Image: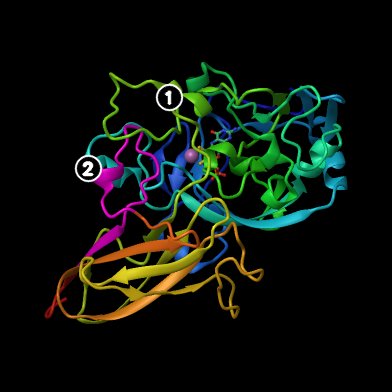
Amino acid sequence: MPGVRGPSDYSKEPPRHPSLYINSKEPFNAEPPRSALFRSYVTPVDLFYKRNHGPIPMVDDIESYSVLISGLVEKPKKLSVKDIRMLPKYEVTATLQCAGNRRTAMSKARKVRGVGWDVSAIGNAVWGGAKLADVLELVGIPKLSSSSKSGGKHVEFISVDKCKEENGGPYKASIPLIQATSPEADVLLAYEMNGEPLNRDHGYPLRVVVPGVIGARSVKWLDSINLIAEACQGFFMQKDYKMFPPSVNWDNINWSTRRPQMDFPVQSVICSLEDANAVKPGKVTVSGYAVSGGGRGIERVDVSFDGGKTWVEASRFQKFGIPYVADDESSDKWAWVLFEATADVQRSTEIVAKAVDVAANVQPENVEDIWNLRGILNTSWHRVQVRVGHSNM
Ligand SMILES: Nc1nc2c(c(=O)[nH]1)N[C@H]1C(S)=C(S)[C@@H](COP(=O)(O)O)O[C@H]1N2
Ligand SMILES: [Mo]
């Protein structure tokens, strides 16, 4: 494995920000406090959630690092970091969201299996790197191909981390070739995050970023790329990150009946309040994030200050001073929007948020209706309780 290797224990983990909430120490899974998310449109790297399945890989010698592209390609090739940096550089602002975001709330409805996450297994970053569509041209696959000449229809990304789900093998995932070779899909081999070289936690020296798709497909510490006829058969594609109906349990599950989850659905979360809060009577301003998969913009965010009986429309924004218009050229199509709404609150109540994307998809009202045994894609209306105290607060 040229240049990058996956350790077999946790003795060489990188330093991390002390304010992260740690959901699991080994492998390291952590998310920032809610307040870190709505404070800035671009999430600082040290506060960006970290989702791992094994010890963090290390680079001993960046000069010897290369990515091998092989499989069903006419011209297999090894690419060094230099080769990749020689391609045109793109900066894509994209929100990465773990499919397990808000799992803890789903497990309160009924038990689910998986790492518990509050609402911050999500972050928005400016990813810098080469487009995968340009990289694949170097091995003879033209733009907008759904099949290579030798029958490759999927692009598999293989890492070097040692994951117990893969019996000590590396993390891997794939996307369809048509998405990989479409310049519009903005799939990157990224070497920068927020203008700095990637750090170890987020995939140094090179990671895949698949905008609009659950985080699980954005493979970190890329070692090789494989052109294959069928989707990747790895654990994380076939035995995890699939959405099942509420009737499926661990006794009757048949993994092969479902497709690997790709795009995520419309989501919104209030980040300025915790699940339960005490406030003084008067004006309450709530803020948070809203995002949808597949590059669909956010058409509207509705906020209710009375448990969902009546709604006000929140204001939406991305970049300072530029009005957000869903699907307009001026907006970042792969990125979240932040929202804000204010109301006069005199009584204890439940505050609720729900977003609508440009395809008019709406978040489901209740978590029970979308419960699934792996606890993925909890996009139910986000609710927080506020207790209003009139004296001695
Ligand atoms: N090699 C590798 N890539 C990986 C993972 C992993 O464990 N190993 N986790 C995936 C999952 S489930 C998510 S949500 C994102 C998290 O990326 P981040 O840690 O940069 O936030 O990385 C994805 N890529
Ligand atoms: Mo994830």
Residue 309 in which image quadrant: bottom left
How many numbered badges does the structure rendering display?
2
Seen as rendered, the residue at the extreme top is: 167
> Taking the image as four quarters, which one is ligand 1 found in?
top right
- Among the 4 quarters of the image, the one containing residue 113: top left
- Using the image, determine if residue 244 lies above or below residue 253: below
The answer to which of 337 and 264 lies nearer the viewer is 264
Instruction: Determine if residue 81 is in view.
Output: no
Under mark 2, the amino acid is: Ala
159 relative to 21 in the view: left or right: right
Tags 2 and 1 in contact by the CB under 8 Å rule?
no
Tell me the kind of residue under disc 1.
Thr
- SS class, disc 1: helix
Please tell me how crowded label 2 is: few (under 14), some (14-19), or many (20+) other residues with Cα within 10 Å: few
The residue to which callout 1 is attached is: 257
Tell me which residue sits at (40%, 62%) in the image: 355
Q: Is residue 186 left or right of residue 350?
A: right
Cα–Cα gap, marks 2 and 1: 25 Å
Q: Position of residue 122 (x, y in %)?
A: 48, 51
Disc 2 C-beta below 8 A from ligand 2: no
3 vs 352, left or right, is: right
Mostly what secondary structure, the magenta segment? loop
In the rendered image of this protein, does residue 215 appear above or below residue 382? above
Picture coordinates of residue 6 (x, y %)? 63, 26
Residue assigned mark 2: 109
The residue nearer to you, when weighing 175 against 319, is 175
Identify which residue, 89 or 246, lies in the foreground: 246
Which quarter of the rendered picture does the N terminus lie within? top right
The question of residue 237 being in magenta is answered with: no
Q: Residue 51: image x %, image y %? A: 50, 40
The first of marks 2 and 1 along the sequence is 2
